Image (spheres, rainbow, N blue to C red):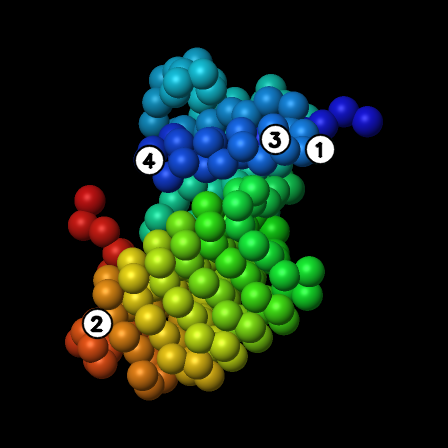
Amino acid sequence: MSLPHLFIYGAGAFGKEIRDIARRANRQEQTWDKIFFIDDFAPPGTWFGDCQSFPFTSVLEDFDSAAIEVVIAQGEPVHRETLYGKLSQCGIRLGRVVDPSAIVSPYASVGEGVVLTAFCSVAADAKVGNNVAVNVQAIIGHDVVVGDHTVISTMVNLGGGTRVGTATYIGMGSQVKEQLRIGDRSIVGMGSVVHHDLGDDLIALGNPARAMRKNETRRVFNK
């Protein structure tokens, strides 16, 4: 049986990190035949390093959808959610890219389209939803639930039993006390220490983390 191709949707910095992870994973256990990028802004046929890029329309026209897998390389949860909907409507299957150094309990659940980067861990009975990105050295504690399209940044620690909502962003180095709930579409700023529940559509930061304002734009980065 032939192996699928992996397409990384987005050829920016995160996309290049995912390419490197996929290469490492492929060396350990061959999962994909070839690795490509999808980039809707680069001219057709552009190469990023040694990986060719295609606009999404070309992927639909030139490749058998049954023979490809896609992961989304976007750091903005709102963009991850939008692209996930686009792929789902077109019947494109999402893959998983897991760095060989990541530690994933056999009793954890990891959804489709998930990216687990270097040295992160997912503990027993944790549930990581679809299209979630977990960055370097992040810790997903036991019985944690992470909602779809959420981004967990580098060196975040989610205490056991925490529930993180859909399309939420947890900034670098944040610490979240066990058994808390962080709502949907919220942003926890870099280095925050969360001691209490946070609701939906909030931007919170500090130690202890406090809600500063509503997340009206749903944008983490200013670019």
- The residue drawn where x is 33% and y is 85% is 196
> Label 2 belongs to which residue?
205
Q: Select label 2 or label 1 by which is in front.
A: 2
Tell which circle, 2 or 3, labels the residue nearer the N-terminal end.
3
Would you say residue 9 is visible in this rendering?
A: no
Whole-Å distance between the Cαs marked 4 and 2? 25 Å
> Label 4 belongs to which residue?
13
Whole-Å distance between the Cαs marked 3 and 4? 20 Å
Q: How many numbered marks are there?
A: 4
> Label 3 belongs to which residue?
26
The mark found on residue 66 in the picture is 1
For numbered disc 2, what is the local secondary structure? strand
Would you say residue 220 is visible in this rendering?
A: yes
Q: What kind of residue is marked 1?
A: Ala
Q: What kind of residue is marked 2?
A: Leu
For numbered disc 4, what is the local secondary structure? helix
79 lies left or right of 211: right
14 lies left or right of 2: left
Whole-Å distance between the Cαs marked 2 and 3? 38 Å
